[in-house]
Image (spheres, helix red, strand yellow):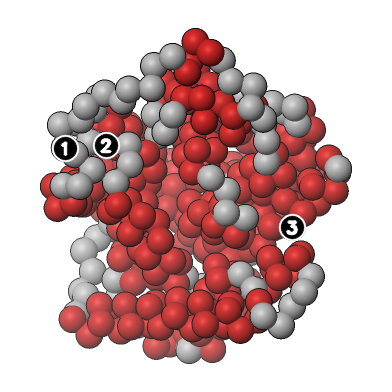
Amino acid sequence: MANGKWLETLHGGRALDSVRANPTPMPVLVSPDQTWPILACIVAGAALSIWLEQTNRWAARLSGPVVALLLGMALSNTHLLPFKAGVYEVVNGYLVPVAIPLLLFRANLVRIVRETGSMLLCFHIATVGSVLGAFLAAYLFRDKFTQVPEMAGIMTASYVGGGVNFFAVKDTYNVSPDITNPLLVADNFVMAGIFAVLLLIAGSQLWRRWYPHPHSVEGDREDVTALAARHWRRKEVSLLDIARALAIAVGVVAAAKLLTAWIAGSIESTIWRSLVANPFLLITTLTVILSTVFHRTLEKTEGAEDLGMFLLYLFFFVIGLEADFWEVMRNAPWMFPFCLVMALANLGFTLVVGKLLRQNLEELLLSVNATIGGPPSAATMAISRGWSGLVLPGLLAGIWGYIIGTFVGIMVTEAVRRMLS
């Protein structure tokens, strides 16, 4: 990616001559056409990220996806692996869509409503905070980027659902990787910082004076190591489980792609086409219907979420490989405050409204975590604080974010377009 092209993309053609002066890329140890060595590094990097998350407290607090992204960035920015390779497109184009239904095998709407309780209210407060933050960030940085509405929608999808929703809105509007890759880097750096803030607030006696905190009282007595061991315990996964999970997931993606092509030919409205004729929304909708109607069958299929999460780790590792950190810092520094405004708006709005509604501190903090980081990071935070009663509600609330994240992101994109027009 040429430096001049990068600046033209972000600043409407106002490139710096000094940046254009050095078009020659540095050589890499593994060339882009060495597919198998690159694929081996991607799979090994994802596996290493999972191991670090489950065996080291610092990695668990960062979250495994952030660790995967940082590892990928380290390998490409030290020129051990290339920034661009054909195998990266395979991960983004084929594995990420399959990850969505796998992650939603437990998305039984009846169970989500029944077992999340007040956590679901807190989650929707945090969701509104992300949406308000998107409008604020879009207005503040409206002159800093092109495609500001798309950036706002992508980050809303990410800060309601997660990485799969980020990718879904990005693909819906065909936003260039020159924008989305550094945006995801900024997203994850901000996310890691917010996680640290959430943990500080959770352990602060000052904040506990202002909010009810029943789970913290229990968590202070909880054996965190034993709780983590129960959550990450080995599962009995059979060959039939794997076959069933992949057959359903790939079948859902195929059906969604066919439906998308058929619906797109029948709708003229651009807005409705982006909503209805959207493969990612259809993938989500079809999976949620199956998970709710045939919940007994899908809930008995062990290993589906694990497969989906592993594919998601591959995705984050590849995003890290594609991100030139120094290019981001030199040419797109505004992406970091853009994401920070959204994250702080989420946190501030959630704490203020949650205080007015007399919600528990733990559920408010976990909702912010679930919106910004997704179900796995919410569960990890609940475990690390000893909030045993909130591990499952945190997971289910995060899954609900996966369900609505893409839809909310698209709606924000269209609304910001009208606001800035």
- Please tell me which of labels 2 and 3 falls first in the chain: 2
Q: Position of residue 298 (x, y in %)?
A: 40, 82
From the image, tell me which residue sits under label 2: 82
Which residue is nearer to you in this view: 403 or 227?
A: 403
Which residue is nearer to you in this view: 416 or 398?
A: 416
Q: Position of residue 73 (x, y in %)?
A: 33, 32
From the image, tell me which residue sits under label 1: 30
Report the residue at 58% width, 77% height from top.
260
Q: Is residue 182 visible?
A: yes
**What label sits on residue 171 in the rendered view?**
none
Report the residue at 64% width, 42% height from top.
151
Vertical arrangement, residue 290 with respect to residue 17, above or below: below
- Element at badge 2? loop
Q: Position of residue 335 (x, y in %)?
A: 59, 29
- Can you tell which quarter of the image residue 136 is in? top right
Report the residue at 52% width, 79% height from top.
256
Residue with the most extreme top position: 18
Whether tag 1 and tag 2 are in contact, CB under 8 A, the answer is: yes
Quadrant (top left, top right, bottom left, bottom right) of the N terminus: top left
Is 418 placed left or right of 43 in the picture?
right
